[in-house]
Amino acid sequence: MSAVEGGPAGGGISATNVAILGIVGGLVGIYLASILNDITATTYFSFFGGIGAILAGVWGADAVRRVCSYGLGTGVPSIGMVALGMGIVAAIFGLALCYVINIPVVLGPIIAFIVAAIIGLIMGTMANKILNMNIPIMERCMVEIAGAGCLVMIALCVTISGTLVFESHVATDITILTSVVQTGFIALIFIGGAMIILHPFNACLGPDESQDRTLYVGVEKGGIIMALSGVASLMVLGVIPAALTIVIGLLIWIVYFTKFINLTKRDAHKVIGTGLLPTEEELQ
Amino acid sequence: MTDPIIIDMGIVALTGALATIGGAAEDLESDVGSQSNPNSQVQLAAQMDFPHRIFNKAISGEPPAYGLWCASSAVVAAVLLESMSVFFALAIGSLVGAILLGMFSVTAHMGRTASQSRFKQPLYMDMVIGHVPAIMAHGYVAVFCIISFSYIMNTIMGHPFPLPLLALFWGVTAGAIGSSTGDVHYGAEREFQNQPFGCGLNASFSGNIVRKGEVGLRNGMDNVWACAKFGGPVTGLALGLTVFLDNWRSTIFTGDNAEWFAIIAGLIIVVVLILLNRIVELNGRKAYGPYKDEEEGGATA
Amino acid sequence: MTDFISLFDPISIVLITIGGILIGMGVHFIPVGGAPAAMAQATGVGTGTVQLAAGAGLTGLISAGFMYHMLGNDGLTNIELIQVMVSGAVGAMIMIAVTMFIGQLVYVYCVGVPPVSAKVDKDPITGDIQDIYVSKGTEGHGIPTVSFVSGVIGGLLGGTGGSLIYAILMNAGYPESIRSIAGPSPEIVALAGIFSAGVFYVNAVVASYNIGGTIEGFHDPKFKRVPKAIICCLIASLLCAAIAVPIMGGLI
């Protein structure tokens, strides 16, 4: 199919639908977590952030899958790293801007998302127009990857801190700056988010790659990173919200890992316990 | 009283030693699992009608992968440090990193193999069960060493970056060094032992990797056994030297203008390395000589 | 809002942009052969461009962070800014020199190939004849002196760029008015560190797309593409700087 011949990647779910799922799912996850936490004055709903991160990550993985089918000249990982490079700058900008110019924090993710999309568009246009990479879907995919990277970052920040407040004038408040940045957990978010986006296609690359199997890997890896964010939030939110995030993350991992194994059995030439190599005749 | 510089040097030596062990384990882990650039040949082999029993672990490039293992181990360790002693926190943190590595290895191997079904590459489940523990074991040693010296730099030497960030940066560096040095032994020599020594790899032989072992069919365990003789140790040397030299020059000078001395010492180290490289280059040219016509390519057999 | 506009410190933005351009140029100097080099099929280090540049740049960032911590608690004077930058550069140079040297040991003593470039007939630095040492079916192997020196220059540029970005972001987040003996607050350090890493990755990837994965050093014909990368890195880092500087400045 795609990887060998360098054509567009096909697959069951259309690019637009995955994008809608990623944007809406990611934003809804972020807002559900922060608003429900605010209303109930607890932190039990932080796990919605993790679910948002998974949905946005799956969208990013699908965009990586489409653009990398063309062959970039460097490996798949580099595009994931640029996604998170753009994503982290945009995400922190969006969240921190609310504090700097004193506007409601709910606008933060939207501003960040728009900024990420603009950076992505400029990067994609530069790649095609100045660097002459001539990949027809480069602009669109860079927008999608940067946007997805940004949403994954914000969603994981919310999972750890339970809030969208980046910095507060009240010293005792939990803020993203003290709970995620100062502790260094942002390192996990940075590289973990990158791996949700770049690992699925890299892991399933090959001529018989199929969209559902690749995206299941994305969901499953998202589940693991979500559980790890839950471990990090132990230090910030306390045991019960952290345990909720960890358990839900691991459940997602188990369910989608099983689905991935089943699809592997469907797609593989044959799955055998052990055995010799195929003989010459079998290979004909 | 002992001069404080002696204690400082001891700490620097300790970071160097940990980095050396960590680097070696890092490279050997990537040889068991066949990660990074040499894996392109494993991937290609099935396509060229050479089905094989070598673990095909394409998680991502080694640097982001090691960044993730080290960052997540350091996050878990940082959380545990609130309530536990350092050794337990680091050990359990590394365990989480190793489990994570195992999880990513399984999907990477199964995903890549299933995506090659048209080349009739079978998916052997005993390989998954046999290789993943060995990958995790090597990975554990590597991650433990890397987050340990990150912790030492952070707490004892007073580096301002928080532990997970420092671990992420050192993890990325360790992965970059591992994929640049030790992996060449695996990719250029061990995978192509069916070619005469020193011929380089003729592009037309791409994918024709050695698939038979001393006993039975070759797998990742056979590869790590060979690479532990050269590739692994020199990778450890490279990471150890990087960490040791960089910390040494920042620590050894005290008093006025210590910063300038540290910078000058670093420049001298770089110049010495350029000269050493020249010596090795001359030795190589002298020992192997130019390629002669009848030997050209060397790989006619 | 006038207050917000005033946070766009033009000098900081220009310096960060320069840092980004230095990173983009540095990537072009680092000799990487990608996957073929890992099979002794092409000259250079056997890994990806971004990965090696990132490894060197982040080592430089660690050195620069150390140096800033030693010098910068009372703010940076110009000479101290240079010390932080050079320190980052030296850190990156050490990392890349050690990596290339050990890689060379593997090529010469383990794979058994002499270091040679197939892109030029004579090594521009040592004058050694190259083409007769290239084995058949390959595009060179190992790291000849010219590539080694080029790589060291790449480390110098990349390390300088990364630590320049870090130092400027620290200065923006820790201006003169709040300087104390306690030094910058830890969250500012961490934020500047991760921001620098993000900007570093963006520039390194743009530059590696420009060279298409492999380059031997400054003698490689592909090196002529540098101006394009400079334009791209200029735009990309200007964008990143324009959103990072006001945020760092506004957090106090």
Image: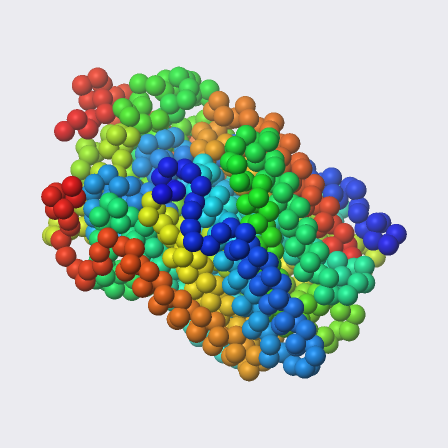
Residue B12 at least partly seen = no
- When asked about the image quadrant of residue A232, the answer is bottom right
The residue lying at 55 percent from left, 82 percent from top is A240
Q: Nearer the viewer, residue C227 or A61?
A: A61
- When asked about the image quadrant of residue B110, the answer is bottom left
Q: Is residue B3 left or right of residue B22?
A: right
User: Where is residue A4 shown, x and y percent of the image?
Assistant: 36, 39
Q: Is residue A166 left or right of residue B92?
A: right
Q: Is residue B83 left or right of residue B54?
A: right
Q: Quadrant of the C terminus of chain A?
A: top left
Residue A54 at least partly seen = yes
Q: Nearer the viewer, residue C163 or A142?
A: A142
Give the total number of marks visible in the rendering.
Answer: 0
The residue lying at 15 percent from left, 49 percent from top is A278
Q: Quadrant of the N terminus of chain A?
A: top left
The residue lying at 79 percent from left, 59 percent from top is A100
Model colouring: rainbow
User: Where is residue B142 shown, x and y percent of the image?
Assistant: 39, 59
Q: Nearer the viewer, residue A280 or C85?
A: A280
User: Where is residue A261 shown, x and y percent of the image?
Assistant: 32, 63
User: Where is residue A48 shown, x and y percent of the image?
Assistant: 57, 71
Q: Residue furthest right?
A: C2
Q: Nearer the viewer, residue C40 or C81?
A: C40
The residue lying at 51 percent from left, 36 percent from top is A135
